Image (cartoon, rainbow, N blue to C red):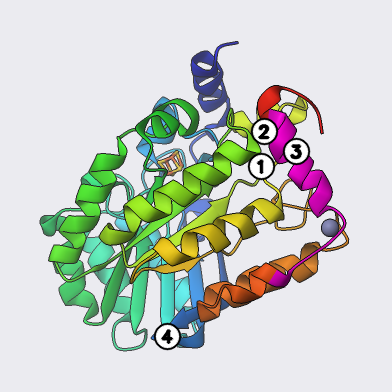
Amino acid sequence: MSPESLARAVARDRRPAPAAERDARRFVNAWVEAEALDGRRVEAFVLILRTRGCYWADQKGCSMCGYARDTLGRSATAAELAEQMDRALARYRGEPYVKIYTSGSFLDDREVDPASREAIVRGFSGRARRLLFETLPEFATEGSVSPLARAFGGELEVALGLESTDPVVLARYVHKNAPPSEYLAAADRLRGLGVRAKAYLLLKPPYLAEVEAIDDVVRSVAEAAPHFDALSVNPVHIQGGTVVEWLFRRGRYRPPWLWSLVEVLRRAAPTRGAARLVSFPTAGGLARGPHNCGACDVRVLAAIEAASLDQRFEALDDLGCGCRTAWDAACRLEPLGVEA
Ligand code: SF4
Ligand SMILES: [Zn+2]
């Protein structure tokens, strides 16, 4: 099967049937995680709202993204979104950093209508200092963002899933809907409106060798840094209903080594300029997430988290384990088509 037809077949299979009203009144998930704000460690409240999800996931979707499975299969009504928000606020304990995700774009009217967006943002106004949401670049306009900046009053941060600044990697391997130039232009637009811009960069899309994936993120950090306030490196983890899962099940994809992430952070840190460079891997140390040998994963993950929170990357130079030899061999031999 060609990568193109594989992507469309996977997209067809993963879409949920329209959800019952009861499910539409419940958000997907909420939790508290470590973050940094103005140079100090703080707690962040993370909320995943249940919406119709990303329109692009219906058409083709990105090769690593299985978030369509957490969506409604139809648009949520304003009343359903209000009830999700009431439930979320009942869990909120005044954490200074709030991150809102929708398994798609918060600024897409089909997911969250403009009045509901303002109500959601206003719900955290005066309590959170910084509020982040994620969107595709085409929805990040003055018309959609400025009312939210006014409704919130604090610091808005908009996250864009740029993934890579290489147009070929983005189109052919990640399967994004727009070229990198549109993400960079959206970031410039946002900052022109006085809003922080954050980029997610993807470590190891399918069809890239380990060493190519490292080089891709290192180059992307240098090229994206002038446009963003923060760059977050997301190593691929295997989500259900995705192209990477299809390849993983057939032994044709290994999630990135944690050593690759360490290498990315060490090499990219000097080129980040004024932007924060962070990584908080999902499923770190698990078979379906970025992992090393199993013996060193917890230690390496802790060092990556500490470096991300404190922006001090020197400690990553001193990490070691016997499995670095296997990683090194994988990096050298994989491009030659040889199993390490
Ligand atoms: S990664 Fe973003 S753009 Fe791609 S399918 Fe998922 S939600 Fe949509
Ligand atoms: Zn190890």
In percent of width and height, residue 130 lies at: 34, 79
In this rendered view, identify the residue nearer to me: 139 or 225: 225
Mark sitting earlier along the chain (4/3):
4
Mark sitting earlier along the chain (2/4):
4
Q: Amino acid at mark 1?
A: Ile
Q: Is residue 264 left or right of residue 253?
A: left
Q: Is residue 95 left or right of residue 256?
A: left
Task: Mark 3 vs mark 2: give the one in front.
Answer: 3
Q: Amino acid at mark 2?
A: Glu
Question: Which residue carries the number 3 mark?
Answer: 330
In percent of width and height, residue 83 lies at: 42, 66
Q: Which mark is residue 96?
A: 4
Q: Quadrant for the C terminus, please.
A: top right
- Tell whether label 4 touches label 1 (CB within 8 Å): no
Q: Residues within 10 Å of mark 4 (few under 14, many from 20)?
A: some
In this rendered view, identify the residue nearer to me: 204 or 121: 204
Question: Which residue carries the number 1 mark?
Answer: 238
The stretch in magenta equals 318-334
- Quadrant location of residue 115? bottom left
Q: Amino acid at mark 3?
A: Ala
